[in-house]
Structures are given as C-alpha cells and as structure tokens.
Image (cartoon, rainbow, N blue to C red):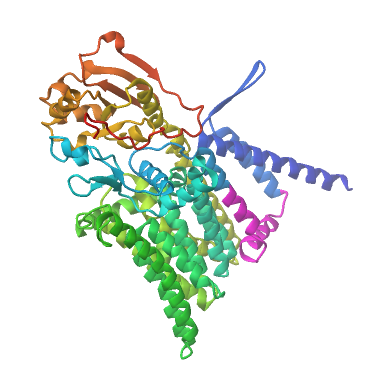
Amino acid sequence: MSAAPGRFTRLRRVAGVLAAIGLGWAAWLFLFGGFDLRLGSFTLTSNEPLRPLVVGLVALAIFVRRSDVRVWLAWIRRILTDGVPTAPLASVLTGAVLVLGLTYGSTSLAGSDIYGYFSQADLWVEGDLRIELPWVDEAPWRDADWTFTPLAYRPVGEPGAVVMVPTYSSGLPLLMALAQIVGGYAAMFAVVPITGALVVLVTYGLGRRLGLPGAGLIASLLLATSPAFLMMVMLPMSDVPAAAAWALAAWFLPGRSRWAPVGAGLAAAMAILIRPNLVFLAAVLGLWFVIEAARAWPRVGTAIGRGAAFAAAAAVGAAGVAAINYHFFGSPFTSGYGDLGDMFQQAHIGPNVRNYFTWMLESSPVGLLGLAVLAAPLLLWWRTREARQFMVVGAIFVAGVWLHYCWYLVFDHWSYLRFLMPAWPFMMLAAAAVAQALLRHRLLIVRVVTVALIGAIVVMQTRHTVSQHIFNLGRSERHYPGAALVLRNRTPENSVVIGMQHSGTIGYYGGRVVMRYDYLDDDDLDLAVDWLAERGIPVYALLQDFEVPRFEERFRGQRVAAELEDRCIILYLGTSEIRIYRLTGPVPHPTEFRRVNGDVSHLRYVPPSPTPHPALRLPGGS
C-alpha cells in the first residue's frame, strides 16, 4: 500500500526537476538567444525557446497537480510579509550588482564625461587642478584658448596667464582620487560598481526602516534588474554615485541615533558635491525634521537640534562647491557649465515629460506604478504613521527630481533616464509596497498573479538590458585607448593632433596636445596648420568614422580639408573605425597607409600616458 505514495513523490520530484530545467532553458534562450554546445563529435543546437517552454510548463503542471501549491505560496508569503529574514537575499542581490559592475563595467576613458572625471581625479591626487596653456597667446586665430582645451575642461584667466580647469563637479573625482590613493589607478574603476551595490542595499534598508523588509527586497530586485540602472553601473559616471549618496541620506534620516542626522547630512553633502544642481533636495529631506518637531510639539527642542545637525552637515557640501567655484571662476555661484539660463526652460517640460514616460514604459514600467503610488498619495500601504509621513517626504523628493529634469535640456535617448536615478529607490519602494500588500491578500489567485507579475517584470527588464547590449558597454569603449596608443607610437612627441570626440583621450592615453576643430572657425584650419608647421610642429588629425563627414563639411574650401582623404596614414579597426591623418608635410605616399587592428583586450586597465597633460614646446621656450 505504501508503493503508490512513493511513486507519486518520485513523480513530483522528477517533474519539479524537469520544470526547472525546461523553464530555465526557455528563459535563457528568450533573454540571451541560442547556442551551440559541442560534446566531442556531438553538437547540441538550441535556438527556439518554445519547445523547452512547453516541456517546462507540462512538467510544472504535473508538479503542481502532485503538490499542494498553497504550501509554496505560503513560503513565498512568509519571506515577503511575515518577517522571515530577507537580508541574505538582499545581500545576494547587492553582491550580484557589484560583481556585474566589476566584471562588465568599462575600464576605458571615453568621450567627455568619463575622461573628465578620471583626469580630474588625477589632478586632485597631484594637488593642482590648473593646467597651464602658455602658448595660446601666440596663436593667431580666434578663441585659441578654447581650441587647445579638450572636452570636460574650459579655459580661464587673463592673456599671458591662461589655464584650463575642469568643467564637471568634483564629488565623483574626489571619490576616485581617494580610491586611487588607497588602491592605485585600477581602484578608480571600482567606485561606481561599489556605489551601485550600495544603492541596491540601501533600497532594501529603506524598506526595513519603514517596517516592510519584504517590500524592500522586492524594490531592490526591481531596481537591480532595471536597464537604466544597470547601464549606469557599467559606466564610470556620476549618476549612480549621486543616487547612492541621496539614498544613504534618506536611510539615515529616520534613524533614532543622535548621529543619524549627521550621517544624513554628510551623505547629502557628498550628493551635493557630486551633483550641485540638486542641492535643493537637501531642503526637501530637511522637511522630515519639521515633521518630527510637529509630532513632538510643544517639546520641539530635540527635533530642532537634530534638524540643525543635519543642516550643518549638509552645508559642508554646498560650502565645498562654493569654494571650488570661487577658486576656479572667481565666484561661488559660477560653475564650469557657465550660464545655466539656456539649459532650464519651460519649453523643455512637454518633450521631456513625453520622453521620460515613454522610455520608462519601455524599459521599467514598474517605476511608473511607483510614481502613481507616490503621487496619489496612497498611504494605506504603510503600516505606521511614521512610515506614512516619511513617504510623504519621499514623494516630494521624487517630484523635485522629476520637475528639475523635465525643466532641463531635451535629449533623444532612453539612457537619459539616468538623470532621474536619485528618485528610483523611492519609486521602486512605493511599487514594491503595493506588491507586498497584494501578497497578503486572502484570495489565492491574487497572490499567484502578484508573484507571476513580479517575475514577468524582472524577465522583461533583463531582456531589455540584454537587447541594449549593456553588458558589452565596457568592451565597446576600448577604441578610445586603442587609437590613442597607436597615435602615441606613430607620431612625434611634440605634435598637435586635431580632434573633438577623442580630444581628452588623445592627451590622456596618447600624450599629445590636442586642438579641437569644433572651436576652430571654418576658415582658420589652413591658418592653424600652417602656423604650427612653420614652427616645426607636426600636425595630425584623429577622427572617428562619424566625424569625418562633419569635418569635411565644416572646413569645405580649405586646402587641408580638400586633401584629407589622401592624407590618411592609419585606419584603426577596433570597435569603431578611426582615421589618423598627417596634415603637414608632403601628401603621404599610398605605401605609407596602414590598417591597424586595434586590440587592447589583453590590458584590463590601460594606464595613462607618462604625460597625460602634455604641453606644447614652441620655438623660444614657450
């Protein structure tokens, strides 16, 4: 009589294993595409997810038929709603984000932002943030100081004492400089993955602080799989560090310790140093202490003291920004971005609202649910009055971020969701609170559908991440150091290289003085090349594929532009095509042309040139 139950148990186990294999196989094919697996002379090819999906669903049906599904749902419910320890699962998510960032994150300086942060970090380590440009006063063309200034920098000073200084805010470069002092050059690339992991962990911690650890876990899962967040974990830019600092400030805010306001203020200070334009968010978080004072009325002394401690600590960041601005530009209210009036306009609001909502709907629609919950505000999801009051502050915080960036410049790519990153922990937490409430529902079907929806959202976000090649971003940026190394090896040291997109990395990796063509008047190209050639300085140009037609169109009618195609000496074939031209001397013979397959994949971290901030040596010692 005992044989039948034993057979049923074995059948359930086999069905469970087949369900896990089939559904996992189908999910892999759905997310990452097909594969060919060779085992000796046997090759297994799998490209179509439908077959393993059918096998998995049939096996799952058998497993459910031979199991009590309520046991499994009760187990999930206990994890998310009834206090079963969620910290280990949150730790796994945190570790996964850190590993992904360290494994797939970019280790190359590129374009304006990344070059700007890393080169400024080097200057902080060196102790001098000004780079002298003594030769620009001799150049006979207009805006010569700007032409010799790479992306992420701007020239300042009077004639005879012109220097270039960083454009970008100093918060992230300071963190990178600290990492370099502690762990060397490579450690700077770990800053963003570490702060990305911190955002995930603190999002979970916020849920715990509000009495909903299950919601914190769901929120951290939704955040950790969102494409915009993962993209910015892969790129060493300031979006994720700023989000981490604001999230940490919010986590400290409701803490009972007397040091909690100081911790919140210092985290806000770092956020302000990273992104000074969001300084007003410190005042938003300060509303929490107004709420504390109202709750404690008429004994408000403690709340006022805590608020003062928060304000004093946060003011360190604002004071630091003011001091740096004064040092560079002579005014605490002038930044490297210059006049902000054109950047913030009412006309930007409509296009930005459409863009942000469309992009979020396509990549992370659950964020819109969180936005709706905060906007209502639907406070019934929160268990305590303190939690409800805290989420009111969170809703104002999110509204401030959205309004600020809807007022800002209009961009045309979904990756600019990164601007809204400081608001994401609150948005994901609000959506997760709804999910946790539904998991408590008395109807079994509601709980089943909620679990299925969470899984579907995670799969959808992961698929979008893969389809956008986010885990290939690090490899795709390798043409910047690769082309600069070729330039360094094949050009004289005292050369000038005309460029724009690569203007920072030409100096950082290549050790050559750059001259930006986007600041050169369209009739001054021949003048600049001839003036340098007369002083014995070879002139080259380094242009990425998309820059070549722009360059030729800009300088149409100039001798150098007309000869450009004949003067190409190197075609660099990496993750992008880059051409290097010799613009001085006789037109190169065709035999001088070389195709170079640029591969620096053997170098995990490409070190900077021995002279990452090169200087031009003109006759007479200038």
Left or right, residue 217 beside residue 234: right
- Quarter holding the C terminus? top left
- Asked whether 352 or 527 is in front, the reply is 527
At 58% from the left and 70% from the top, the residue drawn is 211
Given the current orientation, which residue lies at the most extreme front position?
620
Whether 11 is among the magenta residues is no
Q: Is residue 153 above or below residue 265?
A: above
Q: Position of residue 75 (x, y in %)?
A: 68, 58
Q: Residue at x 22, y 49 (%)?
A: 157
Secondary structure of the magenta portion, mostly?
helix
Q: Is residue 80 magenta?
A: yes
Depicted 64 relative to depicted 446: above or below: above
Give the percent coordinates (x, y) of residue 161.
22, 46
Q: How many marks?
A: 0
Between 378 and 65, the one lying in front of the other is 378
Query: What residue span does the magenta drawing correspond to?
Result: 66-95
